[in-house]
Amino acid sequence: MQNYHTTVVNIFVKEQFLQEFKDATLFNQQSSVKEEANLRFDLLNSPEDNCHFILYEMYKDKDGAKAHKQTQHYLKWKEDVADMMAKPREGVPFIGLSI
């Protein structure tokens, strides 16, 4: 069985930036799924709190996840959304056992 590197990122966005955040993150998502090591990249929005988002990212391995953080689209996203955050984003790593 192969173990996949998965990260669940909790993000809380300032309400005035909701659409800008969605646009920037969807661009990042669309670029990320083209990475060779990417298996999954989902953007989720809480139905109870429209300012709460989850990024669910799965890579073939830890190196693939590390390489993602060096891509131009990730670095642009990170810079573009920095001031949109209501609080620092929190990434929690998991080991994906299957897809």
Image (cartoon, grey):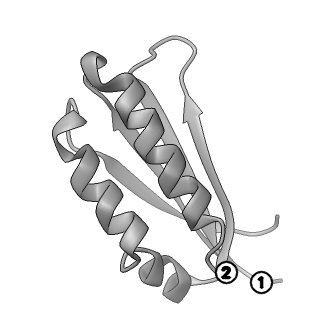
Q: Which mark is residue 60?
A: 2
Q: Pointer 1: what residue?
A: 2
Task: Measuring from the top left, give residue 66's x and y in whole percent.
Answer: 43, 81
Q: Quadrant of residue 79?
A: bottom left
For the residue pair 96 and 39, the one nearer the viewer reads as: 39
Identify the residue at image location x=39%, y=65%. Answer: 74
Based on the displayed image, in which of its 4 quarters is residue 2 positioned? Answer: bottom right
Q: How many marks?
A: 2
Residue 50's place in the image compared with 82, above or below, is above
Which kind of residue does numbered mark 1 sit on?
Answer: Gln
Label 1: state its secondary structure.
loop
- Proximity of marks 2 and 1: CB atoms separated by less than 8 Å: yes
Tell me if 27 is positioned left or right of 51 in this view: right
Q: Is residue 69 left or right of residue 17?
A: right
Looking at the picture, does residue 96 appear above or below residue 17? below
Q: What amino acid type should be assigned to the residue bearing mark 2?
A: Lys
| Most foreground residue, 96 or 22 | 22
Image spot of residue 91 (x, y percent): 38, 55
Residue in view at x 52 percent, y 83 percent: 62
Residue 47 drawn at (x, y percent): 58, 14
